Image (cartoon, helix red, strand yellow):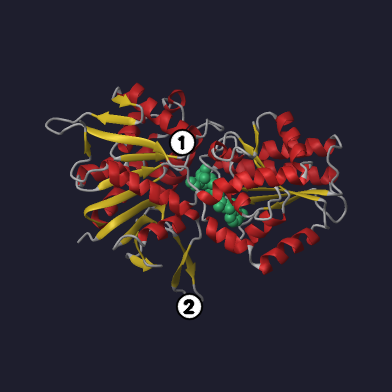
Amino acid sequence: MPTHDLVIVANRLPVDARTLPDGATEWVTSPGGLVTAMESVMRTVDSGAWVGWHGTPGQAPEPFAADGMHLYPVPLSEQEVSRYYEGFSNGTLWPLYHDVIVDPEFHRTWWDAYVRANRRFAQAAVSATAPGGTIWVHDYQLQLVPELIRSARPDVRIGFFNHIPFPPVELFSQLPKRNQVLRGLLGADLVGFQRESDAMNFVAAVRHLLGYQVDQYTVTVPGIGSEPARQVTARSFPISIDTAAVSALTEDPALQERAAELRRELGEPAKIVLGVDRLDYTKGIRHRLKAWGELLDDGSIDPHDTVMIQVATPSRERVDAYRQLRDEVELTVGRINGDHAPIGRPAVSYQHRSFDRRDMTALYMASDVCLVTALRDGMNLVAKEYVASRPDLRGVLVLSEFAGAADELRAAILVNPHDIDELKAAILQALNMPEEEQEQAMLSLRRQVLDHDVQAWARAFLAELESVGAPGGGTPAP
Ligand code: ADQ
């Protein structure tokens, strides 16, 4: 019996399995912005649920509760993980939606698995949702889910949020099955994107490829047979972070001491420059290292008083392009250190592992410059985390104009990371920025980030969904 008023559908459940010494499984909530945002909106409904994969191939455990949320695990076989998740999601859609930085691969077996998996997620959501309830579907792995839900449950409101960019129609058109993907998304009442330009790309694709009528950000989906036409709204909702949680950490004296200790451990350099990314080719890590290496080569930076820390979280390690990227990054770091690092101190301190929130915040607090040089990024939360971690108003953010965050964080030093000379100049400008200028920029950046946290983002999306989605078949066209 479906019972939940609000159901989140995402590829992953917000928990990770941990095996206890006695062999039993314990579920640990994965700390992440989305989880925090959802926890805050779940508190506003009688009953909330989350549908997603639990992270291991094979049979799914029975539904269970964690942190006041009802969790419905969706099973994926080994082959589906390889074809739906690593294949169509991360080998086809991810590179295509990120400006084809690497070549997308298309395989029909991947598509078939994508359809199968999307059906399973949709079915689980349909069974979990109360009559007249709301379903919020997340991200590029589940683009067919809105339409699949709508055909089974015309009584529910359906929202979709795309966490990654939506490409221009010229690129999107390369996608085999592109029209099926667009129709899948148009099953929602509200389709949310990070940037205004993503929403524009989406409606342009709908107009060009499906020929539907589009009025600014409203698409009219024609009815089939006796079905009435419906309206679907596309809009941008820039995601953010849990700023209150970050602020609380920055006030912790133990963390302030940890930040000071980090500087001591690095030999009290005059300046620390930080990069924090999933090890992904979209993040521009190679471009950043090239710029850094050249600045050391030409003597603009002295490795005796300036250190770069590059945190690169292991990611998608079974996908070829990611293995290659790791090799290249590690080779480059090795070369830079071989050429320039003083004995006993790195020129680039490379950290290929995960850190907890406390250590991550201490790193932000300890760093004079944060480099976000993504070649394409939906938003980039690292940029916002850095800003939220600097109540002292010190520190400079260098930010790629190709990250969604660049629309809001105008007071950063904005760069085109493809232009290595420009990137080098921006790094030097950041390193040499007088304190008053840092303060001025940081004040303006913090105003933006502190006023728009992830809880506000979730509330804004759901409020808009409430106003556009009329249960009982979506918003009828006038
Ligand atoms: P991601 O591509 O994962 O997210 P990002 O927005 O930068 O990119 O978020 C990464 C998160 O992971 C940050 O919170 C960061 O602190 C954390 N992180 C990175 N390295 C870590 C490490 N070594 N240890 C611990 N934590 C680490 C996708 C899109 C983005 C979009 C988000 C949210 O690609 O564009 O901003 O979703 O919508």
- Check residue 92 in the rendering and tell me which mark sits there, or answer none: 1
Furthest-left residue in this view = 226
Residue at (58%, 63%) from the top-left corner?
248
Considering only vertical position in the picture, is 144 above or below 251? above
Classify residue 397 as left or right of residue 11. Answer: right
In the image, which is nearer the foreground, mark 2 or mark 1? 1
Q: Nearer the viewer, residue 355 or 334?
A: 355
User: Would you say the beta carbon of the disc 2 residue lies within 8 angstroms of ligand 1?
Assistant: no
For label 1, the SS is helix
- Check residue 236 in the rendering and tell me which mark sits there, or answer none: none
Image quadrant holding the N terminus, namely bottom left
Residue at (16%, 33%) from the top-left corner?
228
Instruction: Locate residue 281: give its quadrant.
Output: top right
How crowded is the residue under tag 1: few (<14 C-alpha within 10 Å), some, or many (20+)? many
Three-letter amino acid code of the residue under disc 2: Asp
Three-letter amino acid code of the residue under disc 1: Thr
- Residue 278 appearing in the image: no
How crowded is the residue under tag 2: few (<14 C-alpha within 10 Å), some, or many (20+)? few
For label 2, the SS is loop
Q: Nearer the viewer, residue 434 or 18?
A: 434
Classify residue 302 as left or right of residue 375. Answer: right
Looking at the picture, how far across and down is residue 166, in whole percent? 45, 34
Considering only vertical position in the picture, is 149 above or below 6? above
**Between discs 2 and 1, the one toward the N terminus:** 2
Looking at the picture, how far across and down is residue 271, in whole percent? 79, 49
Residue at (38%, 26%) from the top-left corner?
205
- Check residue 22 in the rendering and tell me which mark sits there, or answer none: 2
Image quadrant holding the C terminus, namely top left
Looking at the picture, how far across and down is residue 411, in whole percent? 63, 39
